[in-house]
Image (cartoon, rainbow, N blue to C red):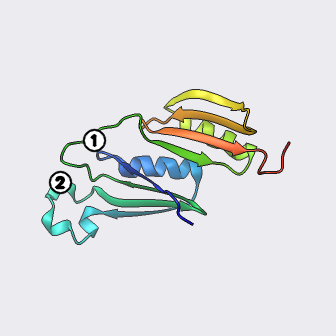
Amino acid sequence: MTKIHSYLTFNGNCREAMNFYKECLGGEMVFQTVGESPLSDNMPKEMKDCILHASLTKGDLILMGSDMVPKKGLQKGNTVSLSLHCSSEKEIKDYYVKLSDGGSKDHALENTFWGALFGDLTDKYGNHWLLNFDKNKAGIS
C-alpha cells in the first residue's frame, strides 16, 4: 500500500523542531548531519552541523525533516498540513496539547458530523497540523 510521509524543511532549527515532535509524539529519532555525510567535502564549513536528514518513526508514523533549504529560500505557506490520525481519544487530546504548546490552537477538538474527534493547530515552528480520531473505526459510538 502506498503511503505519504511528511518531509519538513527548516532553516537551521531542524534538530530542535524534530526533538520537539519526538517529545510530543514519541518514537525513535535518527539524525544525519551534513558533516557526517558524503556531501561534507563539497559543502561550506558552516553547514557541517546542519541536519541533512532526520527521521522520526513510531509504528506507521514517519515524519522526516532537513535543514537543506533550496537556493530560492524557505517559503512557508498554507498549502501543506500534517494530518495525524490518532488511535484513541486520550492520544488525540494529549497530542493536541503538546503540539500546540508555543503555537496556536486554530480550532479546538470537537465531535464532527463524520463521527470523529477533530481539531487543528499551528505549532511554534509554523507548521499546520490536522488531528483526527475516527470514533467509528475505533468501535466507539
Q: Is residue 78 left or right of residue 93?
A: left
- What percent of the width, then of the height, locates residue 1? 57, 66
Extreme-bottom residue of the structure? 38
Residue type at mark 1: give it.
Answer: Leu
Please report contact status of discs 2 and 1: CB closer than 8 Å, yes or no: no
Which label lies toward us, 2 or 1? 1
Quick one: quadrant of the C terminus? top right
Q: Tell me which residue sits at (45%, 35%) in the image.
A: 124
Q: Nearer the viewer, residue 20 or 126?
A: 126
Assign a secondary structure to mark 1.
Answer: loop
Rendering coords of residue 42 (x, y %): 13, 65
For marks 2 and 1, the one nearer the N-term is 2
Q: Is residue 15 left or right of residue 111?
A: left
Please tell me the numbered disc located at residue 74.
1
Name the residue at 58% across, 55% down: 26
**Residue most toward the right?**
141
Between the residue at mark 2 and the residue at mark 1, the CA separation in whole angstroms equals 18 Å
Percent x, y of residue 16: 40, 48
Residue 47, position as x, y percentages in the image:
21, 56
Asked if residue 101 is positioned above or below residue 27 in the image, the reply reads above
Q: How many marks?
A: 2
For residue 43, the mark is none
Dividing the picture into quadrants, the one containing residue 83 is top right
Residue at 68 percent across and 39 percent down: it is 93
Q: Which residue is mark 2?
A: 46
